[in-house]
Image (tube, helix red, strand yellow):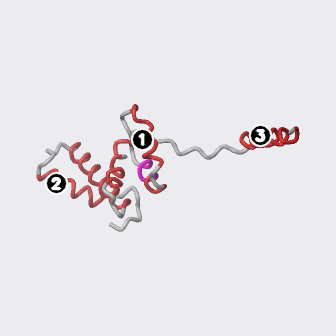
Amino acid sequence: MKYLVQICLALGIAVTFTLFVTPEPAQAQPVPDCIDSDDSRAQNTAAWWGRRTAEEKRLITELECQERFIPMVCIFLWEPDLRACTNKGVAEYRADKACSAKGHALLSEAHVACKEDFKRTFSPPFAGSTS
């Protein structure tokens, strides 16, 4: 009986020591700003962010805060070429913003022409896409 207690005690000490000595697992990459405006759902947002691939995370984090929704829409739509979808969305967003700043009415022919001119000279943020 004495040996059984000693063995259990030694085993317990060994397990406890192992738990304290083993290194901490790597922490997940934190959710970047501007992903979710509802702070009450932080766990849902963190879970969603944890399911993203490295490429998806890179496309989201490398864009400005106002443009981060674009790759998220492409992810939601299950676009096969995420980079091309993101580049196209960013081009559309920036062209619309630039042409509105020039004073063109949103649905006018001048606005459409301005957007086409902008897209011709646009340099995509994520080069190497197939579009």
Which numbered disc, 3 or 1, marks the residue that appears first in the sequence?
A: 3
Quick one: 112 or 39, which is closer to the camera? Answer: 39
Report the residue marked by disc 2: 112
Q: Residues within 10 Å of mark 2 (few under 14, many from 20)?
A: some
Assign the magenta stretch its main secondary structure: helix
Q: Position of residue 114 (x, y in %)?
A: 20, 53
Report the residue marked by disc 1: 45
Q: Residue at x 44, y 49 (%)?
A: 62
Q: Residue at x 79, y 43 (%)?
A: 11
Magenta range: 57-62
Q: Nearer the viewer, mark 3 or mark 1?
A: 3
Quick one: 103 or 29, which is closer to the camera? Answer: 29
Q: Residue at x 39, y 41 (%)?
A: 35
Q: Position of residue 63 (x, y in %)?
A: 40, 48
Which numbered disc, 2 or 3, marks the residue that appears first in the sequence?
A: 3
Q: Is residue 104 left or right of residue 131?
A: left
Q: What's the CA distance linking mark 2 and mark 3?
A: 73 Å
Q: Residue at x 40, y 32 (%)?
A: 39
The amino acid type, in three-letter code, at marker 2 is Val
Q: Secondary structure at mark 3?
A: helix
Q: Is residue 83 left or right of residue 4?
A: left
The amino acid type, in three-letter code, at marker 3 is Gly
Report the residue marked by disc 3: 12
Quarter of image, res 37: top left
Quick one: 77 or 47, which is closer to the camera? Answer: 47
Q: What's the CA distance linking mark 1 and mark 2?
A: 36 Å
The amino acid type, in three-letter code, at marker 1 is Thr
